[in-house]
Structure formats: C-alpha cells, structure tokens
Amino acid sequence: MVHQEQLDFPTRGHGHMQDLTNKVAEIVRRSKIRTGVAHVFAVGSTAAVGLIEFEPGLQRDLPQLLDRVIPPSREYAHEQTWHDGNGHSHLQSTWLGASLSVPVSEGKLRLGTWQQIFHLECDIRPRDRSVIVTVYGE
Amino acid sequence: MVHQEQLDFPTRGHGHMQDLTNKVAEIVRRSKIRTGVAHVFAVGSTAAVGLIEFEPGLQRDLPQLLDRVIPPSREYAHEQTWHDGNGHSHLQSTWLGASLSVPVSEGKLRLGTWQQIFHLECDIRPRDRSVIVTVYGE
Amino acid sequence: MVHQEQLDFPTRGHGHMQDLTNKVAEIVRRSKIRTGVAHVFAVGSTAAVGLIEFEPGLQRDLPQLLDRVIPPSREYAHEQTWHDGNGHSHLQSTWLGASLSVPVSEGKLRLGTWQQIFHLECDIRPRDRSVIVTVYGE
C-alpha cells in the first residue's frame, strides 16, 4: 500500500522553521497504514527538512549554526554566475538534506517525545513551498 | 511485505558510537525479504544514525569533528531556556540525522565492505536508546 | 512492487560530482511504478549522494565547503592507523550521507526544477563506484 499527499505552504524567508509533525501525522492517519514508513521530501534546492525538538531556542540556534558554517557573506562560485544571493542557501539545503523517513507503528509516527519534523527555508526570500509525504507499508 | 523490529540498548554518553550492522542484518534475515530497503531510525532528538567504516580511529574522529563544528561550549538559545547542557547535542543530532536507508539485495544488506551502520549518542548523559528497523520489499 | 538496479561508473577522484538524475529517472520509468519512492544509495564509505542545483558554480562550492569544514590536512585518528590519506574522505562521506529518497508521482521523480541527484567522490583517488537504485510503490 502507498499513500501520497502534497503539503503546500508559504515561508517567511531565510531561517524560517515550521513544524510539519501534525500535518504529516494526519496524512499517516488518512493512509490507514499500520506498519511502515512515512517519507517526507522538500521540493526545491533551497529548502530542507529535518528532525529536531521544535522549541524557540533551537529555532534560533539551527539557522545560526548553518549561517556560521556556511555563511551568506562568502564568495561562492554559484554567485559569480547567478548573482542571486543564494549560494549559501543551496549549500545549506544540500548539507541538511531534503529527504527523511520516519517509521510508522500501530498507525502512528514513531517519533520520540521531543522529536518533531521541521521544514527550513534556506532561500533569502519568502517562498511558496511544497513537501511531498509518501506513506508505504501495510 | 513489511517487517518492523525495535532495538533497545544503553549508551555510555556523549560521543559513544555503536555498530548496529549485525543486528540490522539479523532483522533483514528474519524479514525474509529478498529485494527492498531497510530503514533505520533513531528515536529521540539527541541521538543519530549514520554510515561509516567502523574502526577505532574514526570512532574518535567523528565525535571530535562534531564537537569542533558544533561545540558544547557555545551559548545556544536552547540553553537559555532549558539549562540542560544539551544545546549542542540537539544540533549534532539534527545535523547528522536520525534516519537512513540501506538497499537489500538477495536477502542481504547491500553495504560496501568497509561501510557499517552506527548509532551515535549526542546527549551528555548515558541513555537507554531505541532504534526502529523497518524492512520493506518482496 | 519493488524494482532494483545498479549503476556502475568511474570517478575522477576527490571532489568529482556527477549528475545521476537522468539515470535514476530511466530506472523509475523501467520500474512502471506510478506512485512511490526512489531510494538512491552510494556503496562504499568514501562517497556520498545528495540533492543540489547541478550547475558549475555549486560543483566547485560544495567540495570546497567540505574541504573547509573537514580539511584534508588535519590529524585524524584514522590516519594514525591506516595512513591512506582518506581520514577526511570518510568523514565527508558520513557527514553528507550515502542514502537519499525521492518521491515518485505519476511515474516520474518529483524533483524541483533546479533540484538534481548527484554522486560525490570523497576518496583521494579515482574509483569505480556503484549506486543502488530501489524503486517501490504501486
């Protein structure tokens, strides 16, 4: 069995994190799948998805960490061609990743208590984003 | 076909790496699945799973690298609220990831010779951990 | 339904990126799967796969970023035992990851317009590499 849905939502620009856990959990419920895996995928090359304790402190810490290791201010080869100010955005997205999977047990996401699914906007501008959730199993 | 099992084990605290390859391989064998994928997921927001040549040198190098890029000593916003000393633990877990998948071919994990599945404790304290292994295919 | 194929190709050594998108898309087509997920896995502990806008600037930026954060020149414990010059190669591979999944919708990879699947050689030498693509769904 496979069940696939698309989530569409706007973002507020660079460093904006959103908690997708409840929306993914609803898709798992609609899928009627009891045992399997839920795959979450960020469409686009300047966004990412991941797992984190979704609390206000870490919502500041994670984008700050990314900007410290992969800073906006460096000279990226991407910029020399495209001049879009998004060199670091692409690299942050690649670094963190756009794909993750969470096990489904007894019809529910098998996350830890303090473990949530987030979407991170890495682009310098607000964007309209799509995330594809695919649940498979039986 | 889907087959899911949980691995439970203790850790010795921050930077403790354990090789899960044999245990995941046994679950694949029990699943009777010949062609498919084995998904490995670390439950909790201060642990991670990954792939590495599991030898003593890299078991020191990887935690050191994480502590160099995401150091315990920095001022994280997470700490200002929670004061649990785990700001870096959460960020290291998010950075490395809690979810990976390995192909299954002819009933076996299709890893390289020097490629093993590890669990990494990022928390500052020893913990009791759970990893969910889901094998799907036919 | 599960469909699995292996891609074999040579690399030119450290930092060599290759675009696998068309080859993975062909495997998805041959699988006849309409809705599901395509899993892409790099066999070996000194290679990685990921998602990026595959353009010449970022093909320079990403290996440079990895060499800045995880430099070849550091003293890694791995080197003290193995003396193969590949300490950073292993850590870069673990850091970026060897496993990713892309949703399949209406028989096609559901990637963004500027989002491609790449293979990155992290080893210091040219290598013959294998990537396993597993498509599952219905």
Image (cartoon, coloured by chain):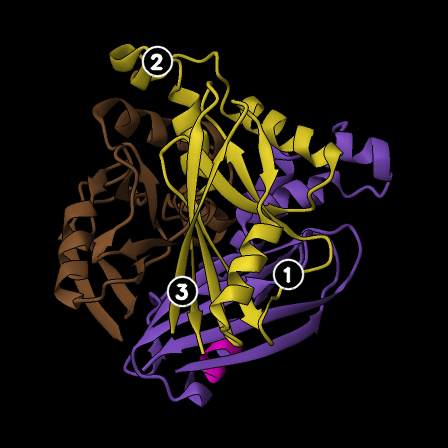
Chain colours: A brown, B yellow, C purple
Residue plotted at (33% across, 74% down): C36
Please tell me the numbered disc located at residue B3.
Answer: 3
Q: Where residue A8 sits in the image (x, y, percent)?
A: 15, 58
Say what amino acid the circle numbered 3 marks.
Answer: His
Q: Residue at x 15, y 52 (%)?
A: A23
Q: Chain of mark 2?
A: B
Q: Looking at the picture, which amino acid does disc 1 mark?
A: Leu
Q: Is residue C26 magenta?
A: yes
| Circle 3/circle 2 CB separation < 8 Å | no
Q: CA distance from mark 3 to mark 2?
A: 37 Å
Q: Is residue B29 above or below residue A86?
A: below
Q: Residues within 10 Å of mark 2 (few under 14, many from 20)?
A: few
Disc 1, SS? loop
Q: Is residue C45 magenta?
A: no
Q: Which residue is mark 1?
A: B111
Seen in the image, is C16 located left or right of residue A7?
A: right
Q: How many marks?
A: 3
Amino acid type, mark 2:
Asp
